[in-house]
Image (cartoon, grey):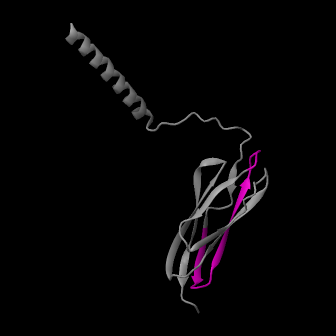
Amino acid sequence: MKHLVLIAIIFVFGFSQVNAQQAVASTGTVQANKVTSPNAPKAKWDKTTSDFGEIEQGIPKEAEFKLTNEGKEPLLIQTAKAGCGCTNLKYSQEPVLPGKSTIIAATYNAAAMGAFTKSITVTTNADPNPVMLLIKGTVVAKK
């Protein structure tokens, strides 16, 4: 009798573990049910890449990325980070009101010769996924 109860417990435990694994495997990822408000802020970028082309060594170059709030609630830039110390960022910490825009300015120092691609990662309250902005070009010798 003890063996029969033990086998039944093992069977139930094993069955519940298999079902739990299948539920995760069928979806691929576990996601929370998130309902987006129709009034939520909506981030619209004028561009996500700025190509400087050829720039002279030692002469910093600035790119501007325009961010517009197309939603009905204020948009906040939560974080903006350059991928390296060779790129400086300027942006407003103030909320972007509905229908208004702001600029994120990225200045590349152009110290090293050669081709470059630098990234800026921006997170807003409009989307939990960050946006990757790129600046690229080639630094050439001064003329």
Taken as a whole, is the magenta stretch helix, strand or loop? strand
Identify whether 70 is placed above or below 49: above
Across and down, in percent, residue 52 comes to 60, 75
Residue at point 48% right, 36% down?
30
Residue at point 42% right, 29% down?
23
Reply yes or no: does residue 61 show up in magenta: yes
| Residue 4 left/right relative to 48 | left
Q: Quadrant of residue 47?
A: bottom right
The span shown in magenta is: 50-74
Identify whether 60 is placed above or below 16: below
| Residue 10 left/right relative to 131 | left
Residue at point 74% right, 61% down?
102
Which quadrant is home to the N terminus? top left
Across and down, in percent, residue 15 comes to 33, 21
Across and down, in percent, residue 48 comes to 61, 61
Which quadrant is home to the C terminus? bottom right
